[in-house]
Each structure stands twice: as structure tokens, then as C-alpha cells.
Image (cartoon, rainbow, N blue to C red):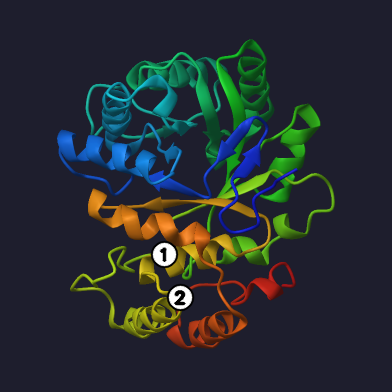
Amino acid sequence: MVEGSTPGRPAVIGDLHLSRIGLGTAALKTGESRFTEAIRQASELGINWIDTDAILDRGDIERRIGASLNTLPAGDRPFVSLAVGFDWDGRSRHAQLRPTFDPRRLRRQLERSLSRLGAETADLVKLHLPIASDALFEDAWSLLLDLRQKGLLRHLGLIAPDSSHLERAERIGACDTVHVEMSLFDRRVSDGELPVRRQRTPAVIANHAFGPDLAVLPNDREGSANTLQPMRLLLRTIAARRRASPAAVAAAWSLSWPGVAAVAVGIHTPDELPAIAKAAEITLSPRDFSDIGKLLPTLGSGRGPVHPRLAGTG
């Protein structure tokens, strides 16, 4: 069962105790030294896991993570969540991605990721669900369960599964985590079947806490859609009430939803980390939720419930 719904407490996934905020790497496009600085600073701030995917710069982000982890003492290295399910020919960063559930390709993907990371075992592996390969889903899941049994990976999850895929997976073997989009502007998962499942529910890990074009930095970036300006202003107001940053408030909002154990927050530079790290300590008030819930329908973007209390009600 998932623990960690209380602000500040870790998300417990088997023997992994993950900080409720994780370091997302998709937007981290800095040079080598700043990349290493981001991972070091995240560790110092209590962020103990990194979320990544081999498809990011076709493995280059994994290589940077591996090089950065190598500079840290073994006991200070964060856990890494990686992904399999998309492959490419390996000759170019611009090579076309191909979805695959082929067991041989999946094993090769995992081995290559581990090599880039400089690791012998994966802490957490999540499987993409490309529709084109759906017929091989059970074969793919069985392989990953076998690799977990053999110790090549410790924990296993699915990326944005519907209830059908999750039930098919769990008939073969336990799924530890479910990885979903969950932000102010993408709340669809809260309107589906997963939040109201009666049987054992895997830990839900949310990604992209800020939604499209919503600035991560407390100071807004220029050129974003005008429709987001009211939300920025509201987040600033709530941040002033909570003595926090708007970015931390947005992440805390994502953490507040039923079943969400942790949130992987994407950053652009290490400078954004101190504000983001405080999100797990923020307890939003009924007034905060009400103000956000009233504003969301007026923005004309996003789908799903506007208040955690309404999650799973349709």
C-alpha cells in the first residue's frame, strides 16, 4: 500500500522511500557542470530520486545523469526512475522512435540504460504503453517481472495505463507504480477509473506538475499564452499566504490529489530547486483549493475535476 499522503512524509514503494518531490530531467538542458550541480543540489535539499527516460535526447540525459551520479558518494546517490517501450536505431539523436513490446528489445533497452547510468540494477522501471504493440503486452510485462525476479530491476510501473492494462498486468504480477500526467492543466487521470479502484492500487507518481507553458520559475517567463496569466496571479496570491513560491504551490496542488504519492517536477536550471523542494511541506487550505477550483473552468483549458474532493466522481 502507498504511504506518504501526509505533507513531508516519503512515498513508500516496497523498500524505496521516495521524497514526495522528484527531479524531472526532460527540461534540464544545461551544460555538464550545471547538470551535475542540479543533481547535487537536489540531493542536498532532500530530493532523493530522479525521473528520466532513454528517449530524452536519445540517451544523452541518461549519460549525463550517470556521469553526475559518479561524482557523488555511493550513499548520497538518488534513486533513478527510467523508462522502456520506445526504441531507435542508436545512430542519431534524431532517429525515429519506434514503439515496441518485443521482449528482446525491451531487455536491450534496459541494459543500455543501465550502461549509460553506470548502474547494475534499475531502481524503478516504467513501461510505455504504445498502442501499436498492444498484442505483445503480456509478453513484455512477463519479461520485466522476470527481470525484477532476477534482480536487474527493483520496482516496476506502467505509464498512463487504463484499468484494462493495469488489470492485465496485475493478473501476471504486481505493478508497483502508475505514472500519470497530473497538473493544473491536465487533470484527466482524476476523471477516470484508476482513482476509484477497490483493489490494491499501485503508487501514483505524477509528472509535469506545472502544465504546458506555465512558468516553473517564480518570476514569469515572457511569451506564454495570455490565458495562463490569471492562474499565475492566483498562484502568487496563494504563495504569499503560504510563504512559498508559486511553483511550489503548483506542485503541492498536484500532491494533494487522492492516491498521488509523489510528483516529478521538471526544472530548467538548478536555481529553481530550492523553491520546488519546499512543495512537500505545503498544506493548502480549503480556501486555496476553492480559489483554484473556481478559476480553472474559466480558463478554457484542461479536463477533469477541479477539486481533489471531486476526483473519481466523473
Please tell me how crowded label 1 is: few (under 14), some (14-19), or many (20+) other residues with Cα within 10 Å. Answer: many
Asked whether disc 1 touches disc 2, contact meaning CB atoms under 8 Å apart, the reply is yes
Q: Is residue 73 left or right of residue 180?
A: left
Q: Is residue 255 above or below residue 306?
A: above
294 left or right of 15 in image:
left
Eye-nearest disc, 1 or 2 = 2
Q: Amino acid at mark 2?
A: Arg
CA–CA distance in space, label 1 to label 2: 10 Å
Point out the image quarter for the C terminus. Answer: bottom right
The dot on residue 135 is: none
> Which residue is drawn at the image coordinates 69% and 47% (left, top)?
3
Name the foreground residue: 203 vs 305.
203
Residue at x 60%, y 23% (from the top left corner): 154
Q: Is residue 269 in sight in this rendering?
A: no
N-terminal of the pair, mark 1 or mark 2, is 2
Counting from the top left corner in percent of width and height, residue 307 is at 62, 76
Q: Is residue 78 above or below residue 192?
A: above
Residue 124: quadrant of the picture: top right
The residue at which mark 2 appears reads as 242
Quadrant in which the N terminus appears: top right
Q: Which mark is residue 248?
A: 1
**Residue 165 spot, x, y in % from top left:** 69, 42
Answer left or right for 81 relative to 88.
Answer: right
Residue 196 lies, in percent from the top left, at: 77, 59
Secondary structure of residue under mark 2: helix
Q: Relative to 87, is 303 above or below? A: below
Circle 1 — which element? helix
The structure residue drawn at horizontal position 24% and vertical position 73%, both measured from the top left corner, is 220
